[in-house]
C-alpha cells in the first residue's frame, strides 16, 4: 500500500480500540481486518493496512523481556524472562487494534 492509499484508508478504519464498531446496532468490521484460519486461535489476526499478522508482531519483540516480578518478601525485582512466557503480545486475534489509527474520538474530529 503506497502513502496515498494509506492516507485514504484511514477514513475506513473504525474509531476506538477495536477493529470493528457498531453503527445503528449493526456490527461493522474494519475492512482491513481478517483472521487466518490456519493459525492458532490466539495468533490468527491479520491487518492488511499494516501488512502484518499477530505472528509478525510477536516475532518483532526481543527474545528476552524485562518484567517486574514479586519476590517472596513482597518486594518487586526486575527479571528477564523469555517472551514465550508472556505471549500473546499482539491482540489482533481478539480484534484489538495494532494500527493505532483513530484510537480516541479526538482523532476523528
Image (cartoon, rainbow, N blue to C red):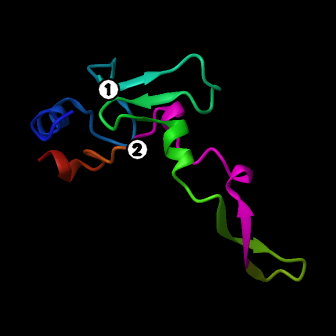
Identity of the residue drawn at 34% across and 44% down? 99
Identity of the residue drawn at 88% across and 83% down? 73
Quarter-wise, where is residue 26 in the image?
A: top left
Tell me the residue that label 1 is attached to.
32
Identity of the residue drawn at 25% across and 33% down? 13
Q: Residue furthest right?
A: 72
Tell me: 67 left or right of 109: right
Residue 82 in picture, x, y percent from top left: 72, 58
Residue 52 in picture, x, y percent from top left: 42, 36
The reply to whether dot 2 and dot 1 touch (C-beta < 8 Å) is no
1 or 47: which is nearer to us?
1
Tell me: 8 left or right of 81: left
Residue 11 in picture, x, y percent from top left: 15, 34
106 or 76: which is nearer to us?
76
Q: Residues within 10 Å of mark 2 (few under 14, many from 20)?
A: many
Please give the range of residues in magenta.
Answer: 78-98
Tell me the residue that label 2 is attached to.
98
Judge whether residue 93 is colored magenta: yes
9 to 68, vertically: above or below: above
Task: Name the quadrant of the N terminus.
Answer: top left
Label 1 sits on a secondary structure element that is loop
Which of disc 1 and disc 2 is earlier in sequence?
A: 1
Give the label on residue 1, or none: none
Tell me: 27 left or right of 105: right
Residue 45 in picture, x, y percent from top left: 49, 29
Label 2 sits on a secondary structure element that is loop
Identity of the residue drawn at 40% across and 41% down? 97
57 or 12: which is nearer to us?
57
Amino acid at each position: 500500500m503506497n502513502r496515498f492509499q494509506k492516507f485514504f484508508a484511514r477514513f475506513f478504519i473504525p474509531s476506538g480500540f477495536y477493529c470493528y464498531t457498531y453503527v445503528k446496532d449493526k456490527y461493522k468490521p474494519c475492512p482491513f481486518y481478517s483472521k487466518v484460519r490456519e493459525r492458532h486461535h490466539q495468533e490468527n489476526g491479520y491487518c492488511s493496512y499494516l501488512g502484518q499478522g499477530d505472528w509478525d508482531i510477536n516475532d518483532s519483540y526481543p527474545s528476552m523481556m524485562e518484567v517486574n516480578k514479586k519476590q517472596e518478601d513482597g518486594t518487586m525485582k526486575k527479571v528477564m524472562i523469555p517472551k514465550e512466557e508472556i505471549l500473546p503480545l499482539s491482540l489482533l486475534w481478539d480484534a484489538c487494534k495494532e494500527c493505532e489509527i483513530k484510537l480516541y474520538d479526538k482523532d476523528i474530529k
